[in-house]
């Protein structure tokens, strides 16, 4: 079945790099996403990667995909207090219809 | 460029009632999907609409139904509300030709 797992919490100091990890079970996904959610808000798309890619970099964000281990990571360089939020990993399946399966989210705390 | 818009933002219903939530997709998007996010959890896929038809469905009972209109906007209907239906309902839109999935701010439903 389709399952996406993430660690629940991560705490880092301001200025350090943050690495949020995710594992998934179904390798037939087309896209892998990272979303950010702040309290009381909707989901903000941070970045996404095609499942046939290994890496994507976008300013402070670096996504790494290890297809063999079904492992996805998001690295945030120079983490700021404004990065404190919940980060969701998700798999997108484009199979006639389109659906996305989310993990439970990783809460990132950034200490000043 | 307006993003995904949802209404209402908050609403309170009682058990057994029915609710309709509305969503307008991001300009240029033709596909709409709905998600339920319970407190402290990741979004759960309800269903997806394209060309006015339901294309994919998650593990939700028939009490959850939807509709897509010719202008690509969509409604989510929930009948016979249960206490457990209390959640943030998120609408997302994308183009059939890209994987960029954008979310609205959500409609927070409380069932008493």
Image: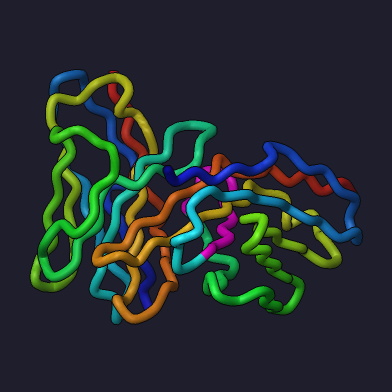
Asked whether A41 falls inside the magenta stretch, the response is yes
Task: Tell me what residue is drawn at x 36 percent, y 39 percent.
Answer: B108
| Residue A40 drawn at (x, y percent) | 51, 44
Q: Is B37 a magenta residue? A: no
Q: Which residues are magenta?
A: A32-42
Q: Nearer the viewer, residue A2 or B76?
A: A2
Of A71 and A12, the residue lying toward us: A71
Q: Residue furthest front?
A: A68
Residue sitting nearer the eye, B110 or B40: B40
Pinpoint residue A73: horizontal percent, then vertical percent.
Answer: 70, 59
What's the residue at 30%, 19% (across, down)? B83
Q: Is residue A46 left or right of residue B62?
A: right
Q: Is residue A89 above or below residue B18?
A: below
**Residue A18 picture quarter:** bottom right
Relative to A15, is A56 above or below?
below
Residue B49 pos. (x, y %): 20, 61
């Amino acid at each position: 079945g389709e399952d996406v797992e993430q660690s629940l919490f991560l705490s880092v100091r301001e200025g350090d790099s943050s690495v949020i990890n995710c594992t998934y079970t179904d390798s037939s996904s087309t896209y892998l996403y990272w979303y950010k959610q702040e309290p009381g808000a909707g989901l903000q798309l941070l970045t996404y990667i095609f499942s046939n890619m290994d890496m994507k970099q976008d300013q402070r964000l670096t996504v790494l995909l290890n297809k063999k281990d079904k492992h996805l990571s998001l690295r945030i360089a120079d983490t700021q207090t404004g990065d404190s939020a919940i980060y969701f990993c998700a798999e997108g399946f484009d199979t006639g219809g389109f659906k996305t399966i989310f993990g439970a989210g990783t809460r990132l705390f950034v200490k000043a | 460029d307006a993003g995904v818009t949802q209404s209402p933002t908050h609403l309170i219903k009682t058990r057994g009632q029915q609710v309709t939530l509305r969503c307008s997709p991001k300009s240029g998007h033709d596909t709409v999907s709905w998600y339920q996010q319970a407190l402290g959890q990741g979004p759960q896929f309800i269903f997806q609409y394209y060309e006015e038809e339901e294309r994919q469905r998650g593990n939700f009972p028939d009490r959850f139904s939807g509709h897509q209109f010719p202008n690509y906007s969509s409604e989510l209907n929930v009948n016979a509300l249960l206490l457990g239906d209390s959640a943030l309902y998120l609408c997302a839109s994308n183009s059939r030709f890209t994987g960029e999935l954008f979310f609205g701010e959500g409609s927070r439903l409380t069932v008493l």
